[in-house]
Amino acid sequence: MSTHRSTSLLAIIIAAVASLSAQIPAGYYDRLNGKCGAELKNAAYEIISPHTEISSYSDLPRYFQVTDVYPESSRWWDMYSDIELFAPSFRGLNREHSFPKSWWGGNTDIPAYIDLNHLYPSEAAANQAKSNYPLGVVANASFDNGLVKVGSPVSGQGGGASKVFEPADEYKGDFARTYFYMATCYQNLTWKYTFMVQSDLYPTLTPWAMNLLLEWAEKDPVSEKEVMRNEHVYMYQNNRNPFIDFPELANHIWGNRKTEPFKVDETPQPGDVPVLITPVQDMSLDFGEVAVGKSATAKLLFHGQNLTKDLSVVVAGTDRKLFTPESRTVSYRLANSSAGTYLNITYTPTETGDHTATLNVYDGDLTGTGIYVYLRGSGADIPSLSPVVALPPQDVTADSYLASWEVPYGDVVDYYVMSRTRYVGGATLTEEIECEENFYTVTGFADSDQETYSVQSVRLGYRSPESNLVFVTHSGLTTVGEDMPLAAETPGGGVIRFTCAGVHTDVRIYDITGRLFATLPELTDGMEITLPAGIYFIVTATHATPLRTIVK
């Protein structure tokens, strides 16, 4: 993985964030006061759901260098493994959705996909073993790296899943508070997998999940790591994890205090004084790496209370011309609303290198000179990506296989997209899988008659040309028919004789490596062709399931 970024710029970001003291903005949690149970959960949702989205999924390693590195060293703070890996290299690590993205269907267009509050660096093998299993206590481990376990759950846990993921005791509270956040911030989602969540606004968590997470949160209290990470994430996203700020909040929503009104604090509230809750002074809106000539747009959340005039914004600094806000003003009425309002800011690099500016926010009857938001971006050359080479499957079992691929020397890659096509009873099912490494363990093969896969590398949002196509079959010849049956026999001498119904068009013949070996305009019943000895896969316009045949 590539994490190209100048160390000087990273040092500026770390210094700016580390200098902050843990302080909740005045008025941020006002709506929680006096509420309990479902009403309290909904108030928390209204506070944390609107937030500034980070630049992109591929840029996560740069954010992790601030949020998930030990303060005394450059070692990654990985809650999934004790293997010592060091920043800025991200090799051997994955961008892990601790709350599995498949649970909401894997949609990459919603904020949950790039929400730092549940994204962590994870050692690749542990991440693969975790899969999309729910949290739980492991009874019999199938994976144990000395820190985390994966295996069958103890009685009463798992929500129907065959396995659960059990983190180390020192991080069980971290994961519990992460799941409290996700079940609140995204309570309006419809869940595809309901191991721990159910599609309702309250309680969202299933009963067994509530009990487990409340227990873990109590036994593993909030750590300094969580507190500082919460501050760092707030500086990027303008939202906080309230279950870190107020550990007792979970009990007022799901636990034994859910009928007891929650109190934020006993300090006097600001009354009618104009307050800008977000953005905050010295926060960083980071656009990441953007190819020269292209643009990236980020949404900056504005949320206030008692503002009486529109806010004014102006970009200042050496690189100010590269950062363009969509408007010079922000409506105070919209900023005062429960959801706040967003200002779109576009970064368009004209040359390579790091670029910085500040967004000055003033007026709105705010006291003082206003606040300053750092704008950061890095211009990069437009990538030139060569096709990767997909390799034959390895470790093929009845239900799984290892897909892997080779990357051309010198190509810098953010991640890979593997296109997996399953052929099931004449139906064709295709999905795209994002992969951190140049391999991926495919499961559920037993449900397919046969499969194919190809791979593309991704850099700065650009995809390489598609790789060769790899065919994966169970033992024996496959002659699965579709709209028009197709079969082949090989009498010898390199001859293939076809048996089919009607005329097949757009005939493509692939060799065992997935290379397109030959094409035919059409194929009819009884037709014969001659090929060199080898294994071939034949696909036609009306028979998409690859027909495997051996020529001798």
Image (spheres, helix red, strand yellow):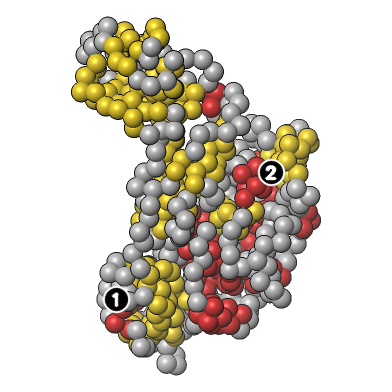
Q: CA distance from mark 1 to mark 2?
A: 46 Å
Q: Is residue 245 above or below residue 374?
A: above
Residue 350 tag number: 1
Name the spot of residue 10 as percent of width and height, x first.
53, 77
The part of the image, by quadrant, that contains residue 172 is: bottom right
Disc 2 residue crowd, few under 14, some 14–19, many 20+, Cα 10 Å: many
Name the spot of residue 419 as percent of width and height, x first.
42, 39
Residue in the foreground of this view, choosing between 87 and 271: 87
Name the spot of residue 379 as percent of width and height, x first.
37, 73
Residue of label 2? 165
The part of the image, by quadrant, that contains residue 85 is: bottom right
Type of amino acid under label 1: Thr
Q: Is residue 267 above or below residue 547?
A: below
Residue in the foreground of this view, choosing between 431 and 551: 551
Q: Is residue 21 above or below residue 386?
A: below
Q: Residue at x 73, y 66 (%)?
A: 223
Residue 300 visible, this angle:
no
Q: Residue at x 53, y 51 (%)?
A: 436
The quadrant of the picture occupied by the C terminus is top left
